[in-house]
Amino acid sequence: MNSPYNPYLALRNAEFRYYLAMRFCITLAIQIESVVVGWQIYEITKDPLSLGLIGLVEAIPAISVTLFAGHLVDVSNRRTIILSTYFGLLLSAIALTFSTFDDYQDFIRRADIAQTVPIYVAIFITGIARGFLAPANFAFMSQIVNKEEMGSAINWNSSNWQIATIGGPAIAGLLYAFLGIQLTYFIQTILVLISIIFCLLIAAKAVLPKADRLPIVQSLKEGIQFVFSNQLIISAISLDLFAVLFGGAVALLPIFAAEILLVGAQGLGFLRSAPAIGSVLMMFLITYKPIKKNAGKILLWSVGSFGICMIAFALSTNFWFSMLILALSGAFDSVSVIIRSTLLQTLTPENMKGRVSAVNSIFIGSSNEIGAFESGVTARSLGVIPSVIFGGCMTLLVVGITSWKAYKLKNLDL
């Protein structure tokens, strides 16, 4: 007889609590960087494409290293990899802090270097670090919690990430407005250091024996084949990829904040937080009432509703209504995150989690950055509002095609 579901089971594990604290601080730091960098670059350039380039500069290195990172995660000490990525993020945070000093800016001008170049270099470093971080985080969690704790851990991990995603943009907007950009980047640097401390509190875990390791090319091929041969996994990942690629309006929020809703940097922070507020509320609901029956149909309806929210947001000229629409979009998106995370954790063998997560990161993680570039390009060619409407319509089209083709996903029960 199955024991009743206990939503708090994973929280009894001390190392899992350290893991949550570690991820919370690093996510908070990354979110702060994302908001402040977007505002900083837009103030310098006043060009929508420059916002899209932020995503591209981060996505290129992330995509380039992620598959190798997945292989490395499956054959190496996962905690060591996470610590290495944190030091990369620390370097990026320090570089961004220095980019705000007057003496540094004078040096850049004397050297005849564009003011945005050092900022893009720091973002490039962040991209490399995040390319390793995503598969390492995913695989490391499965070594910290046992099978019985996994369901609870997935929900708490997702909620924890979303809470940090709420706090990061809101804190960034407030810090930028009241303390200035220099102190905001300094606080981001401190958060990365705290993440390193929490990571060190977790014991290093076992590494796959050398005798069981495959050559790197064969190893990567095995991970890719596993993902593409599993219709449930590839359908869920593809649905998220195209929804985020076309439907996201996050990269253009500085323009909405500055020129359409007229709420400035502080308002931008709240706009960036709104989707995560909806996500957290939905994830807490799912934590207590897990999705089991008709999960596939719920997933498709949720992604379609996300696309409708993007269209409504594009048409809104009221700050509070825009906040509500973005919160709803986050709630619908969180359903997809939970279902996809559950599929990946439960269907992937332990010795392949790094590689499978790497493929997932290329599809999902980097689609955020490439989607930001797509938003910048379409905003420059079509205009800001038409580009977001176009993205929402494309998301609805993707949902329709997926519902027609991916019968296993459509009929999924968890």
Image (cartoon, helix red, strand yellow):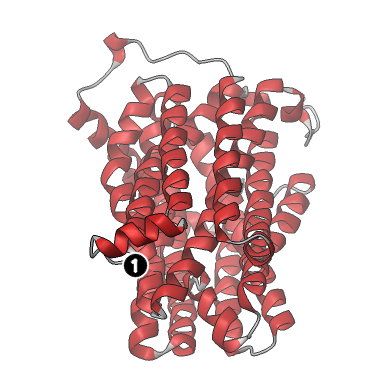
Q: Is residue 400 visible?
A: no
- Relative to 247, is 269 on the left or the right? right
Q: Which residue is at a point 45% across and 41% down the rendered structure image?
A: 89
Q: How many marks?
A: 1
Of residues 239 and 414, the one nearer the viewer is: 239
Kindly identify which residue carries mark 1.
Answer: 53
Q: In this rendering, does residue 79 appear at all?
A: yes
Across and down, in percent, residue 259 comes to 55, 87
Q: Which one is in front, 49 or 289?
A: 49
Q: Position of residue 380 (x, y in %)?
A: 35, 85
Spot occupied by residue 211 in the image (x, y as percentages of width and height): 27, 9
In the image, residue 111 lies at what x, y percent? Answer: 23, 60
Q: 109 and 360: which one is in front?
A: 109
* Relative vertical location of residue 287 with respect to residue 396 in this rendering, above or below: above
Q: Is residue 219 above or below residue 50?
A: above
Q: Secondary structure at mark 1?
A: helix
Identified by mark 1, the residue type is Leu
Judge left or right: residue 18 versus residue 410.
right
Mark 1 Cα-neighbour bin, 10 Å: few <14, some 14–19, many ≥20: many
**Measured along the vertical axis of the image, is residue 145 above or below residue 86?**
above
Residue nearer the viewer, 225 or 322: 322
User: In terms of image quadrants, where is residue 329?
Assistant: bottom right
On-image quarter of the C terminus:
top right
Relative placement, left or right, of 326 versus 8 is: left
Q: Which quadrant does the N terminus fall into?
A: top right
Residue at screen point 31% across, 30% down: 71
Residue at 32% x, 42% y is 66
